[in-house]
Image: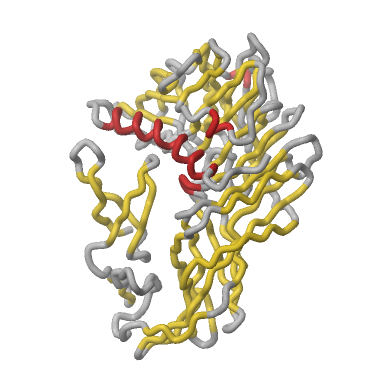
């Protein structure tokens, strides 16, 4: 963990916040406040060096310090990325809703061409649209998607790499199989909890880059600008998290014990 | 039942803004820093709207208390943050096992349930929470009583000590309890706090 400069905390104090060393630029949320953090200088991590990101060119991936400046070679067509999932595996009049919000951050995989294409790290990209995917009923698991574009970059003395270029938009909802979730909390009939989970689970095959071809991970931090809402029907039911209880890093959330 | 394009953002901001104000106000006082102690960061942000029949309380037992410290935590006080027409009738620390929590119930807690050591419950003030081991943890159960048709609170405060240090955990779940009416689909917009 590196230590990065933050901003004042409202009391005239300067915040010093730990940030992961691998990502040179962060926008994090502290108690509902967005705090933009930039590392002071490039940080060495073993034989790798991170460069500070620029406004005009994304450069989040790790790369040897001998690399030349990245050059945009090609922008690929838009691809659907998985950004959220809700699930009700029972039938009892419950509803589910996912909203993906403008400025919501998605961490999408970065591909590097070293002995073939493989994933190496993620790139944090913000959206420019708000997508209310609508309200759906019970006995269904919904996967929510929106589009991003990837681009191919080259660097002198270093392998080519591909990472997100921009947010493209659009909305697609698919019916999928529910995940297993067994860390449950019962919610009474008529309750309507909202979960603004800081870090959602990662879709291991989140977004394809057909031109390579490679399929990269996608993770959406629902953060303060996105949410999952479940509404209980006339009976109480469990809401279950896959990796933790619903209120504490659940990963996936499912209504009904699986 | 369709959401407006800005619902999510407004929902989030209207949940987060009062919390942030409360947090800043507390952070500027001489009290302990919030959410830095062995009971963790107060969990994920969110909200809960609940329909209640007149005269009925809500038992909220979805606040995990996992002591990651080296010695027992002693809870000193549990309170509501910025309550409006809402009373904290009682609060308990309930030992739990496995993947279970007490849950959210209309009415008083139902008593024994799988994974919930109900007979071992303690009044929250003065309760000792040993360091978590295995799947043994604890849950905070608060009993909330509306005193008006729309009852609200921005969060729950837990003040506690561990190892001679004073700590303050604040949850990030806002409450809206509606007496005699159901929660609308976009309840954070209609009840922005």
Q: Is residue A212 above or below residue B84?
A: below
User: Where, quadrant-wise, is the N terminus of chain B in this rendering?
Assistant: top right
Q: Is residue B184 above or below residue A218?
A: above
Where is residue A79? Give x, y as percent: 60, 71
Residue at the image point whose x is 41% and y is 25% from the top: B157
Residue A55 showing in the rendered view: yes
**Can you tell which quarter of the image residue A81 is in?**
bottom right
Q: Is residue A107 above or below residue A111?
A: above
Residue at the image point whose x is 67% and y is 35% from the top: A231
- In the depicted view, which residue is nearer to us: B12 or B35? B12
Q: Is residue B80 left or right of residue A247?
A: left
- In the depicted view, which residue is nearer to us: A39 or B187? B187
Where is residue B6? Give x, y as percent: 52, 45
Where is residue B29? Give x, y as percent: 24, 27
**Can you tell which quarter of the image residue B148 is in?**
top right
Residue that protrudes farthest toward the right in the picture: A91
Q: Is residue A219 left or right of residue B40?
A: right
Residue B44 showing in the rendered view: no
Residue at the image point whose x is 47% and y is 57% from the top: A105
């Amino acid at each position: 963990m590196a230590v990065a400069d933050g901003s004042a905390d409202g009391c005239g104090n300067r915040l010093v916040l730990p940030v992961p060393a691998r990502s040179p630029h962060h926008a994090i949320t502290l108690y509902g406040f967005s705090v933009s953090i930039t590392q002071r200088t490039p940080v060495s991590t073993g034989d790798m060096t991170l460069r500070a990101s620029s406004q005009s060119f994304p450069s989040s991936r790790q790369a040897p310090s001998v690399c030349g400046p990245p050059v945009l070679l090609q922008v690929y067509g838009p691809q659907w990325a998985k950004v959220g999932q809700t699930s009700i595996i029972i039938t009892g009049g419950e509803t589910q809703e996912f909203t993906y919000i403008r400025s919501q951050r998605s961490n999408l995989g970065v591909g590097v061409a070293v002995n073939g294409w493989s994933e190496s790290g993620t790139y944090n990209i913000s959206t420019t649209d708000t997508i209310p995917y609508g309200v759906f009923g019970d006995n269904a698991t919904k996967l929510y998607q929106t589009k991003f574009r990837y681009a191919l970059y080259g660097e002198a003395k270093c392998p080519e790499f591909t990472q997100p270029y921009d947010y493209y938009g659009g909305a697609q909802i698919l019916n999928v199989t529910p995940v297993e979730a067994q860390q449950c909390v019962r919610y009474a009939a008529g309750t309507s909890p909202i979960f603004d989970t800081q870090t959602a689970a990662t879709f291991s095959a989140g977004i394809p880059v057909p031109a390579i071809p490679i399929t990269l991970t996608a993770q959406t931090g629902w953060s303060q600008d996105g949410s999952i809402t479940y509404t209980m029907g006339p009976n109480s039911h469990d809401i279950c998290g896959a990796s933790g209880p619903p209120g504490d890093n659940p990963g996936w959330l499912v209504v009904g014990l699986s | 039942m369709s959401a407006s394009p800005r619902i999510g953002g407004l929902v989030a901001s209207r949940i987060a803004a009062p919390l942030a104000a409360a947090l800043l106000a507390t952070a500027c006082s001489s009290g302990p820093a919030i959410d830095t102690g062995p009971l963790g960061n107060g969990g994920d942000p969110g909200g809960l709207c609940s329909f209640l029949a007149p005269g009925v309380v809500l038992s909220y037992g979805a606040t995990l208390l996992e002591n990651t410290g080296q010695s027992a935590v002693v809870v000193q006080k549990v309170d509501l943050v910025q309550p409006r027409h809402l009373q904290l009738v009682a609060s308990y620390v309930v030992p739990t096992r496995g993947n279970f929590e007490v849950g959210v119930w209309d009415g008083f807690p139902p008593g024994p349930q799988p994974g919930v050591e109900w007979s071992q419950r303690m009044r929250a003030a003065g309760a000792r929470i040993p360091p978590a081991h295995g799947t043994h943890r604890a849950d905070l159960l608060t009993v909330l009583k509306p005193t008006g048709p729309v009852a609200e609170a921005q969060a729950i405060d837990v003040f506690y000590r561990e190892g001679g240090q004073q700590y303050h955990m604040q949850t990030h779940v806002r409450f809206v309890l509606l007496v005699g009416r159901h929660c609308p689909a976009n309840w954070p917009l209609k009840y922005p706090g």
